[in-house]
Image (tube, rainbow, N blue to C red):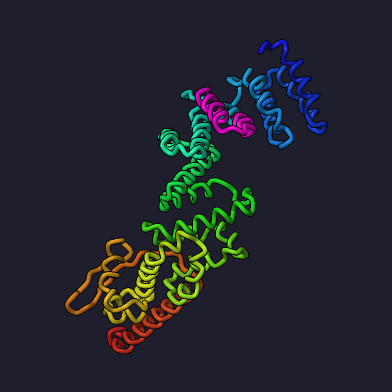
Amino acid sequence: MDLDTIPNFLADQRDAAPADLQHLFVSFEDFWERRLWHQLTDVLLEYFHHSESGPQRITIYKTFVLSFGDKINQLKLVILGLKAAAQYKDNQERLKFLKSLADKVNKPSSQDAWVYATAAVARVKLELSDYEGARKELDSAERALDSFDSVETVVHASFYQVNADFYHAKMEFASYYKNALLYLACINISDLTSPGRETRAYDLSIAALVSDDIYNFGELLLHPILDSLSNSQHSWLRELLFAFNGGDLAAYDVLAGNMSKNKLLHDHQEFLYKKISLSALTEAVFRRPPHDRTMTFASISKETKVQPDEIEHLVMKALSLGLLRGSIDQVSQMARINWVQPKVLDMKQIDNMRARLKDWDAGVNQLGNWIEGVGKDVWAA
């Protein structure tokens, strides 16, 4: 666009804008004429932030913003571009716009902006069910991210969000769980809507339960996102996670009736019972002091409520998964455990640890008193 026509263009757009936002166009023209690109960018971001600006975003971006796009912060240029792209109703048109935006900022000095735009391209491809194309975009973005010493949090958040959504669509639960938690680590969860928080917590909980690679839910149990389930129709799911964490088979039996509410949980019921049995085993070992972790199959069966003929396979599974370390004596039907995987403790587990520490303290005092009693002559000498 001819630069001489910019003032007329801004005047026309000002007249078409909502009355309470028209004053911003005066700032647009003032900063543009004085070449104050930083200030101009910020006031444009302020305008684009208002939902009422929607109908004008594409026109203003293409006609006005791109006329000085190379002179402003490229990450902010992408942010403006994404706001404009959101106005396209057709995904193919949006994809074409975003590809052009990504190509524009694909320069050595603005790779962070390119990653941000590429994540947006991947999201649209995901919405179009082009999983192969989305994966290709995400892999390219990930390689660039790995090469950065530092980058704006919003860039990481955008990548992890789309990457998580990709794995969720592909039902790769462990990868979804990891990327969704990384996304939450990059944002303030209060910025999410209440339904958004609840949906994210629900999906994370389901992924944690049905994944055959996740046996420690500590990071999720400690995350405030899980509180969004507390007073919802899915509160049982939060309780189920804590039951798994504590290996509480009694609580599992009470809550198992809710699994029919979710197809994935319903289809994985046999696997979930084996998974909580493993948790019950690790909890039984954890409750014991380190010097008393040689357990008979019968005692394991009694403490975990698992059938005696399944104990050997259960212990072998726990050893193979790295949940326990030790050995099995098949002849005497004993398991000698010397290490158990650490995990997040609930209040009951903390109280058990407190009792063990008190017992240890009493034992140390008793030993000290015994040494003092039998060694009086030595101490005197």
Furthest-right residue in view?
A: 19
**87 left or right, relative to 182:** right
Residue at horizontal 37%, vertical 64%? 271
Decide whether the magenta segment is chiefly helix, strand or loop: helix
Position of the C terminus, as image quadrant, is: bottom left
Residue at horizontal 71%, vertical 28%? 56
Give the percent coordinates (x, y) of residue 59. 67, 23
- Is residue 283 at all visible to an observer of this figure? yes
| 98 inside magenta stretch | yes
- Span highlighted in magenta in the image: 79-104
Residue at horizontal 25%, vertical 74%? 335
The front one of 367 and 215 is: 215
**81 left or right, relative to 253:** right
The front one of 281 and 12 is: 12
Numbered circles on residues, count = 0
- Location of residue 259 with respect to 98 vertically, above or below: below
Position of the N terminus, as image quadrant, is: top right
Residue at horizontal 28%, vertical 74%? 311
- Indicate the quadrant where residue 130 lies: top left
